[in-house]
Amino acid sequence: MLLNGSVFVRNHELAVCLYLGSRESLTIPPSKLKSIADIPQKQYRDWASIVLSVEPELAMTSPSGEWLVRWFWITIMMGWVIAPLVGLVLVILARVIGVRYSFRSIYTAAYRTVAYMLGLVGTTVLGHWTGAIVMLCEY
């Protein structure tokens, strides 16, 4: 909002009045003025670069053949090898400790949980490790 040469801006933590006029026409005593350096600021953490390790140069760039092959094999390994093996191990553990659910219900819950966690964590970890965008899609 602009009022008498001043712009009022705010975010969820702080409101500031910025004067856009000349210094001579300012009616506030200089002792009450603050510079940008006087405004407290928190350390900025770029979560996007932490979670998504690499971004393509152009958003609509089609993936290379190498990228598609790597994505395919990583997805196959995570979704069709690791998640089912963990699911079977959890079914065996459930049987050993005496859980009375069917094989199918334990395996399905374990597989879905592991597949979700691999997609959630694996996308970030594998993206940082390979230096490329790795989107894990397990079904």
Image: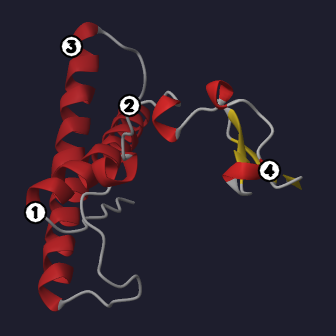
Residue 91: name its quadrant. top left
The 10 Å Cα crowd at callout 3, few under 14, some 14 to 19, many 20 or more, is few
Tag 3 near tag 1, CB within 8 Å? no
Callout 1 crowding tier (Cα within 10 Å): few <14, some 14–19, many ≥20: few
Amino acid at pointer 4: Ser
In percent of width and height, residue 134 lies at: 25, 65
Left or right: 120 as drawn, with respect to 3: left
Above or below 9: residue 96: above
Residue pointed to by mark 4: 6
The answer to which of 116 and 102 lies nearer the viewer is 116
Residue pointed to by mark 2: 106
Asked if marks 2 and 1 touch (Cβ < 8 Å), the reply is no
The mark nearer the N terminus, 3 or 4, is 4
| Disc 3: which residue | 96
**Three-letter code for the amino acid on which mark 2 is drawn:** Ile
The amino acid type found where label 3 is placed reads: Val
Amino acid type indicated by mark 1 = Thr
